[in-house]
Amino acid sequence: MEHVSALFLDFIASWGYLAVAVLMAAENACIPIPSELILGFAGYLIFAGKMSFFGALAFGMAGGMAGSLFAYVVGARGGRSFVDRYGRYFFIKKSHVDLAQDWFDKYGFKAVFFSRMLPVVRTFISLPAGFARVDMRKFLLLTFAGALPWTALILFAGMQLGEGWKLLTQIGHEASIVFVIAAIIVIAALYIRHRNGKKRNLR
């Protein structure tokens, strides 16, 4: 695994933004490449002055959206039986698809947004969305809304950690959970503030 990771890092170091887009597309197309590895190293390259934050963010998001759309189309056209049959050839574990399916069955469209910040589920949530053939425009909108803060956060963390960016590959799952909790608190606070503001206007 370390050898494979080194190949990915060499690819990013050599091809820059394009490599970030390609690898993020692969990761979101359910190929098991840790986004913390891709974006963490890109963040380090920002720290080193070899990339810009907004350039890496734009290419990372473009690749991620393309990969998510691909996985959605595979799910919509191939169905669960196709993924179960051929997924193993692309290192897709049935247990991971099951986890994403359970999450989608329980939370529906909301899962597309919040899962983008969660370990494992964020990579595979596009498949059950495709199985269900949910509205593609809404799927893409929620995917973008959920992926943008996560992508920006990991890039920023890699940039701040500098030479110690590999810490992200060790604590990525824990960071995901903390980030989701923080996001829920912020959204709840904004909703309560908005509701209280409407009540005051009605008086």
Image (spheres, rainbow, N blue to C red):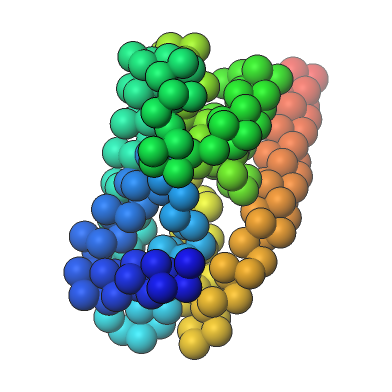
Q: Quadrant of the C terminus?
A: top right
State whether residue 163 appears in this view: yes
| For residue 17, side relative to residue 144 (left or right) | left
Q: Position of residue 53 (x, y in %)?
A: 36, 68
Compared to 11, does 109 lie above or below? above
Q: Position of residue 44 (x, y in %)?
A: 42, 78
Q: Nearer the viewer, residue 85 or 103?
A: 85
Q: Position of residue 61 (x, y in %)?
A: 35, 49
On the image, which quarter does residue 195 sit in? top right
Residue drawn at (35%, 23%) of the image: 74
On the image, which quarter does residue 60 sit in? bottom left
Compared to 60, does 147 lie above or below? above
Q: Position of residue 34 (x, y in %)?
A: 49, 57
On the image, which quarter does residue 171 sit in? bottom right
| For residue 107, side relative to residue 71 (left or right) | right
Residue drawn at (34%, 39%) of the image: 67
| For residue 58, side relative to residue 171 (left or right) | left
State whether residue 138 appears in this view: no
Compared to 199, does 60 lie above or below? below
Residue drawn at (34%, 67%) of the image: 8
State how many labels appear: 0
